[in-house]
Every structure is written in structure tokens, then in C-alpha cells.
Amino acid sequence: MTAPAPNSSAAPLLDVSGIAISFGGLKAVQNFSLQLPRGSLQGLIGPNGAGKTTVFNLLTGVYQPQAGSITLDGQALRGLKPHQIAAAGLSRTFQNIRLFGDLSVLDNVRVACHLRGSHSLAGTLLRTPRYVGQERAMTERARELLALFSLADRQDEHACNLPYGDQRRLEIVRAIATEPKILLLDEPAAGMNPQEKKALADLIRTIRDRFGLTILLIEHDMGLVMEICERITVLDYGIIIKNGTPREVQTCPDVIAAYLGGASEMKGTETRR
């Protein structure tokens, strides 16, 4: 499946308007707004502590916004629980890998496939033909996804035994297995070497195009962000200071000032798209 080209004139797939949250006297995120067109690949960046992961937690129901609205494909998400938001089509990975380490690679993906299942208690207990058929289909789906991501030969290993890069890929596979409309990637390149980061950039593009997904990613590696993202939103102290193309963000004085010691990194990164 090939992702449709983002259409700025159409209603955004994800429409976030003015969300905010405070923890005590700390305003972690203020008046955050974002529109993701269907099929887009966008980045969310900012210095450490800028509020990026807090935004992801607000979008996925880990935290409840104290103001504003979140709409996914016409459905209001504010007030929903994380599993309800996942069922609506918003899935994520985490900055710190959260696989089920004692389960097999295959079972990690099968668990995610169950989000779209419709087992009844009686069917599960009695192992009815419908239940058996659904389980067989989920297992086959999980194996197909693992094969696409070159993990099929490790499907019977415990997830905790995979090399770090493979664990990152498995977490992405598990998120895709929920059949999302939007995929949120929280620092997918963390801990990767340059070769792994190059492979990750190719993988993210492939995911978007093959599965027709809309992708929003948090990432500290500016080379990766500038290479693959079409638009970038920059946070600082929970406030958006810039939203634009990689070139516009790269040359924005406010962005360079926010990164301070990272200014040379921002200036020295060239867009390679």
C-alpha cells in the first residue's frame, strides 16, 4: 500500500487544538496545537525537558489534557483511556523499550494483534471454531509482519534476548500490529549506531509508504529528523516556538537559541531529501 500524498486542503487526520497540562506549578505543555495531514511524516523536537514525551502522553491518554481538544479522523479522543485511543487508531512506541521480555518475539506481536480481535468469553473457554480461526489468523498476521521486518528467524526467542536494534524494530512491529492510522515514535534512534540509524530512516519511510500510515516522531538526532520529516514542530519549555519545513526550522534563530550548545548541530545539518 502506498501512502497518499499529504493534502493540506483536506481535513487533518489528527487535529490537536490548544492542549495543556500542568504539574503543580509547572506548566509542562501550554496551548499545544498540531495538524497532521493523512500520510504525512512529521517531527517533534526540542531540548531535553521541553515537553515532547508529555505531548505524546497527552495524545495517547496516559495524561488527560486540562484544556484543548484532540480529534482523530473525526473522533474526539480527550477523556478516553489509552486502550480506547489505541483502538481508535493511535499507536506509539516508547523512549524506553517496553517489550514483554519474557514472552517470545512472536507472542509480543500476537498480543498487539488481539486489539482488533473480537473473542467472547464463552468462545475463548470453549475454543470454538471462530475462536480458533481468529487465533490462527492473528498468528499468521504476526508472522507476516515479523518477516517484513527481518525478524522471522527470531520469532521463538524471548524478546529480552534480542540485540538492541532488533528490540527497537520489534517495538515498531508491535505498534503496527494494532493497525493504527497514526504511529507515534518516541526517540526510535536512541542508542543506535550510524549504520542502524541509516537503516531506521529507510524503515520509517517504508512503514509510511507500505502501510499508508501517518507518522509523528520525537527524535534528538537532527540528521535523521532533517532527512525524513516533511515538517517539524519545535517545543521549548512546553511552548511551540517554531513549526515549519526542515529548512525553516534549521535556520530559525529562536530554535538555535533554544538548543544553545546544540546550535552548531542544528546549523551543520543539511537536508538530504
Image: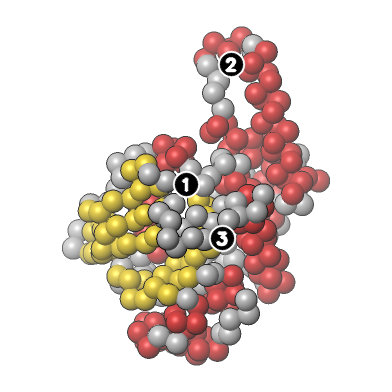
180 lies above or below 269: above
Q: Residue at x 64, y 11 (%)?
A: 128
Q: Earlier in the sequence, mark 1 or mark 3?
A: 3
85 lies above or below 213: above
Q: Residue flagged by tag 1: what amino acid is it?
A: Leu
Q: Which mark is residue 72?
A: none
Q: What residue would you read off at disc 2?
A: 124
Q: Is residue 19 left or right of residue 108?
A: left
Pointer 2 local density, CA inside 10 Å: few below 14, some 14–19, many at least 20: few
- The image quarter in which residue 273 lies: bottom right
- Distance from the alpha carbon under mark 2 to that under mark 3: 42 Å
Answer yes or no: is residue 172 visible. no
Q: Residue flagged by tag 3: what amino acid is it?
A: Ala
Q: Nearer the viewer, mark 2 or mark 3?
A: 3
- Distance from the alpha carbon under mark 1 to that under mark 2: 27 Å
Q: Residue at x 67, y 46 (%)?
A: 159
Instruction: In the displayed orientation, state which residue is furthest to the right.
Output: 153
Helix, strand or loop at label 2? It is: helix
Q: What residue would you read off at disc 3?
A: 5
Helix, strand or loop at label 1? It is: strand
